[in-house]
Image: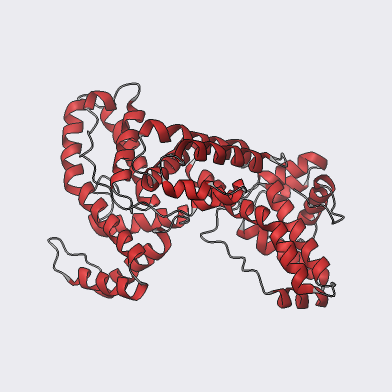
Amino acid sequence: MARRGHNLLSPIPQSTALSEKSCGADSPFPAHPGAAQCCSQQGLERKLCLAALRHPPQPLPRFLQPSDRELCHAFRQEPREFADRFLYEYASSYSQAPLPVLLASTTTFLSMVSTCCISPAPTACFLKEKLERKTLSLLTLTSNRICSRFSAYGKDKASFSSLASLAQKIPTASFEELLPLAEDAAEVASQCCDSMAEDCMQKKLLEHTARVCSALSARDRRFAACCQGKNLMENHFCILAMPPAPATRLPEPLEPTNKELCAKEGALHATRFLFELARRHPNLPEAVLAKLYDSSGKLRRECCSSKDPSACWDIKRQRIAEELFPFLAKADQLCGQYHKLPFLEFKKRLRDSLAQPEPEPSPAPLEQLLEQRASFASSCCLPDAPPLLCTSKVSLELGELCQGDSCLLG
């Protein structure tokens, strides 16, 4: 990943220096409960141990790149302190990106600053260097997002998250077309998020992007537009940032039978039904769909292990109709309006909607509920919504809806 034209250290000495800095008495990095044990080891064992330490995914990346002038001012004042502070802020913001990606990104950034801040033409230098770093910058941003979801969800749920996202972007594609692509995305995360191989994430992600483009660009003009570029990383980022498609008129999905849900392929039947819900509700946020995924597994374990699975499912289906579908409709409408309206108009309509009398009014005051829903929409209706933050916000909404654990999604 290192660029030609700069005398950069190779990844092995660089990672040695990084591990020594992490274990030094004056380490600029945040404290971690497992760091002391890692630092008692030496060589490769220490580096692998430190690489395996994970801070929880940040709700949102905190690193905001200063202007070129501000960068050079801070760099000239105290180069070592500048580098240490940058490493801390960047690494903690993108803590879930694979270590080799993070290492390459920080190394090339610091090289850019040290080169351009002494250049006679710094503006032109920064422009050239940023263009050269573009693919690596996108890889860092994208891999941090992918690995944040993998860390929060695990492989199976990450696969479902990818499946639901694709279903909302191209609702005309079938379950059989999209499931292999979703499983492939989860496999990339599984192989590369903790890999020390320098090019694992870049190589596997570009191969995955080529497969997505091959399968879907002929089916949908938006995918075709994203896939026409020569830079596969830019193509992947374009697909990732693609908003959901407009709602499509589709027949009502067939619910799996009680027997199918408790059969060997029960999880697959449940996933297929959730896929059908996602493609019919394109604005449903990922965190709501992830909650549905968790709840479907919980219901299957509960009913399929009961003495009378059919009776258990019959009761659950009635409650699903009463509780689940109205909640999905409200969440879909909330995010749909958030995508469509300017924020102030969105809040005005939301206030009007919340002021309408409800059969079972919320105990929360109107203004509190308004800010809670607006915060949920602005954080969780977006394609790159932070998974842990939005999981907690969904739980908060469900607490308002059904008083804690008294409902199926609680």
Q: Is residue 28 visible?
A: no
Asked if residue 239 can be seen in this view, the reply is yes
Q: Extreme right residue here? A: 7
For residue 366, above or below residue 320: below
Foreground residue among 315 and 171: 171
Q: Residue at x 76, y 71 (%)?
A: 124
Residue 363 point in image, percent of width and height: 22, 66
Coloring applied to the structure = secondary structure
Q: Residue at x 85, y 48 (%)?
A: 13
- Report x, y in % for residue 100: 71, 46
Number of numbered discs: 0
- Residue 131 in percent (x, y) is at 69, 60
Q: Examine the image and state in which quarter residue 210 appears.
A: top right
Horizontally, residue 80 falls left or right of residue 194, namely: right
Please tell me whether residue 391 is drawn above or below residue 270 in the rendered image: below
Is residue 40 depicted above or below 180 in this figure? below
The quarter of the picture where residue 334 lies is: bottom left
Q: Which residue, as the protein is rendered here, is positioned at the far top?
A: 264
Left or right: where 347 falls relative to 312: right
Residue 405 placement, left or right of 87: left
At horizontal 66% and vertical 73% (from top left) the residue drawn is: 66
Residue 46 in percent (x, y) is at 77, 43
Residue depicted at 66% across the width and 61% down the height: 90
Task: Reply above or below: 207 against 331.
Answer: above
Residue in front for this viewpoint, 235 or 14: 235
**Depth order, front residue of 222/174:** 222
